[in-house]
Image: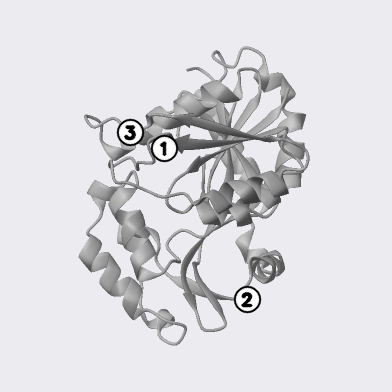
């Protein structure tokens, strides 16, 4: 049994310099999936500087990082279909009989050692995974925007399907199998970019056809550390899903991680996790 971690590499590849060090020690292998023609799921060109590969060579002292290049753009497919296809192709490279952890470049796993400890305790789920597929869900702290002295984050941590024993993805990382929740957190850079970077993300990711881009950007530009309490409904798909924002102190990833750990409200209660897992167990018991 191995803990295989994979990232999809695209226009925001520089963020991997934050994400990879957080999971490197506990991962058995780290896979980086890169389109061989340097295209996004929408077919737009991207450039990955050679200095990034130089950084990988310097950082990868244990020789854990595998570069997987393939043709991930299909003109006839939607961006979401391209995403699902790439995730399945990457999972195949990562190997059966292992825990398949797929993360995005802008996801910084705060509690990865505890998450891996939990996965290793569920080793039995790797036997006949096609008959008992599960997806393991930690929680995302979504950073909405960088402001003076810190960041604005979404007030509620949201579930994210980060690992699975059977990577039959249906949409993004969702496999539509039983979810097992784990009370660990991922700090998600999400939409805390420059306006130019944010527009690039919105135009090329899997949800690009689902967003009212102009309306969303207008609110994103307007909110700041002084007026965020006077506004609500911030999500890019269904605005009310992100009802309110919260200020988190810190400019660096290290400072933000410390601030998160000091915010007990960011973590769910053990009873909440137990209740969610029991509900999922009962729901899929007779399926």
List x then y, in percent, for residue 59.
Answer: 71, 48
Residue 163: quadrant of the picture: top right
Q: Secondary structure at mark 3?
A: loop
Crowding near the residue tagged with mark 2, few <14, some 14–19, many ≥20 C-alpha atoms within 10 Å? some
Alpha carbon of mark 2 to alpha carbon of mark 1: how far? 30 Å
- Say which label, 3 or 1, has the lower sequence index: 3
Q: What's the residue at 39%, 66% (across, down)?
A: 243
- Which quadrant does the N terminus fall into? top right
- Say which label, 2 or 1, has the lower sequence index: 1
- Is 210 placed above or below 194 here? above
What residue occupies the far bottom of the structure in this picture?
226
Left or right? Give the position of 121 relative to 83. Answer: right
Q: Which residue in the structure is indicated by mark 1?
A: 172
List x then y, in percent, for residue 234.
Answer: 36, 66
Alpha carbon of mark 2 to alpha carbon of mark 3: how far? 38 Å
**Residue 239 visible to the viewer:** yes
List x then y, in percent, for residue 155.
Answer: 50, 66
Residue 86: quadrant of the picture: top left
**Residue 175 visible to the viewer:** no
Q: Secondary structure at mark 1?
A: loop
- Number of numbered discs visible in the structure rendering: 3
């Amino acid at each position: 049994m191995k803990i295989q971690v994979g990232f999809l590499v695209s226009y925001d590849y520089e963020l991997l310099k934050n994400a990879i060090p957080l999971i490197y020690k506990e991962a058995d292998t780290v896979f980086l999936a890169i389109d061989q023609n340097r295209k996004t799921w929408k077919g737009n060109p991207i450039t990955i500087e050679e200095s990034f590969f130089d950084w990988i060579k310097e950082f990868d002292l244990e020789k854990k990082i595998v570069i997987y290049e393939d043709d991930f753009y299909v003109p006839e497919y939607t961006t979401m279909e391209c995403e699902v296809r790439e995730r399945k192709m990457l999972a195949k490279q990562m190997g059966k009989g292992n825990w398949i952890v797929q993360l995005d470049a802008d996801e910084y796993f705060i509690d990865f050692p505890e998450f891996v400890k939990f996965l290793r305790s569920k080793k039995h789920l790797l036997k006949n995974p096609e008959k008992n597929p599960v997806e393991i869900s930690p929680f995302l702290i979504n950073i909405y925007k960088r402001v003076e002295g810190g960041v604005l984050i979404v007030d509620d941590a949201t579930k994210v399907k980060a690992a699975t024993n059977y990577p039959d993805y249906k949409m993004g990382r969702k496999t539509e199998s039983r979810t097992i929740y784990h009370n660990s957190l991922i700090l998600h850079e999400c939409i805390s970019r420059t306006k130019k970077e944010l527009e690039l993300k919105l135009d090329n990711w899997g949800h690009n056809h689902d967003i009212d881009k102009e309306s969303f950007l207008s609110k994103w530009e307007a909110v700041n550390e002084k007026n965020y309490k006077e506004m609500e409904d911030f999500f890019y798909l269904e605005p009310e899903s992100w009802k309110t924002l919260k200020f988190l102190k810190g400019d660096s990833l290290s400072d933000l991680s410390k601030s998160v750990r000091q915010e007990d409200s960011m973590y769910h209660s053990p009873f909440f996790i137990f209740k969610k897992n029991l509900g999922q167990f009962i729901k899929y018991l007779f399926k």
